[in-house]
Amino acid sequence: MLTASATWAGLSLARPLIMGILNVTPDSFSDGGRHFSTEAAIAAGRQMLAEGADILDIGGESTRPGSAAVPPEAEIARIQPVIRALAAAGAVISVDTRNALTMAAALDAGARIINDVSALLHDPAALPLVAARNCPVILMHMRGTPDTMNDFAVYNDVADEVIAELLAARDAALATGVKPENICLDPGLGFAKRGAQNVELLRATSRLAKLGHPLLVALSRKRFLGEVSGEAEAARRDPESLTAGLFAVQRGAHILRVHDVAGTVRGLRVWAALNARDDD
């Protein structure tokens, strides 16, 4: 259980942090193509900073279900100039990648955090790279790869199994030399989990938040929310995303990864005001 004075990646965890999603891709599930050009991506990143994002998560490969892999060289060409520009503007940047070459290029360009959907297990060079660079890292739970993960969405108890597999990935990182204070955990909602499994896992947020590391919850606009609400269009699921995000924060989540930065900032302000305790 983290204390109220805990920090991660140089950021205080005294309040929930907001990570803005910046996909420099033509095919991401919600906003594919909107920020594919360098200029559009930089402008979007600056807008999210102005709206209150604490971290910008920049990725050059879609990892939606069924997506194909992107070579590291293509990832780097997409994201490196965006990272350089936004880091120069003062942004705290995480790079969303599974590839060690991309991780190294992003860190060299000014990124501070590695966000890996494979928990550093996809690329054999990733674990030693993160250990050597001594950088903060987000380890996410997933089974299989983005194009096969739905085949592995079979659980007896999704919360128990996700926690056990996340801790095994954490232990692999520690054994390679990654420092425990650099590790953040992400249960991987929507990755190798189907609708009801995601709901069940989200209900276990309080258990995940007690694992001794910051907890990131990434549920923005995901399909399982639309299955609950009846909204088929991903870009129209911001109300569902905010509701579920506040549910997670109430149960101990430290970071929300979101598309709608402005709406999440406002929602968290109201949540914080309503939960403030009077001195008397």
Image (cartoon, rainbow, N blue to C red):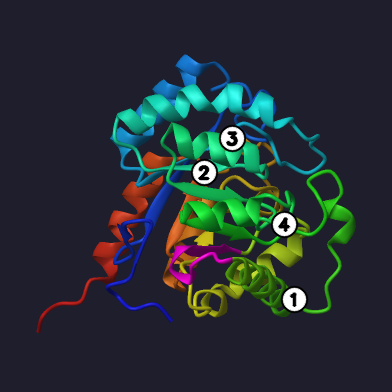
* Residue position for label 4: 121
Structural distance between the alpha carbons of marks 2 and 4: 31 Å
Amino acid carrying mark 4 in the image: Leu
Structural distance between the alpha carbons of marks 1 and 3: 31 Å
Q: Quadrant of the C terminus?
A: bottom left
Q: Which of the two marks, 4 or 1, is nearer to us in this view?
A: 4
In the image, taking residue 178 as reference, residue 201 lies left or right, namely right
Above or below, 104 against 248 in this view is above
Point out the stretch of residues depicted in magenta: 177-186
Q: Quadrant of the N terminus?
A: bottom left
Q: Determine whether the residue tagged by mark 3 lies in a helix, strand or loop.
A: helix
Amino acid carrying mark 1 in the image: Glu
Give whichever of 215, 82 is nearer the camera: 82
* Residue position for label 1: 161
Q: In the rendered image, which quarter is residue 260 located in?
A: top left
Amino acid carrying mark 3 in the image: Ala
* Residue position for label 2: 238
Q: Residues within 10 Å of mark 2 (few under 14, many from 20)?
A: many
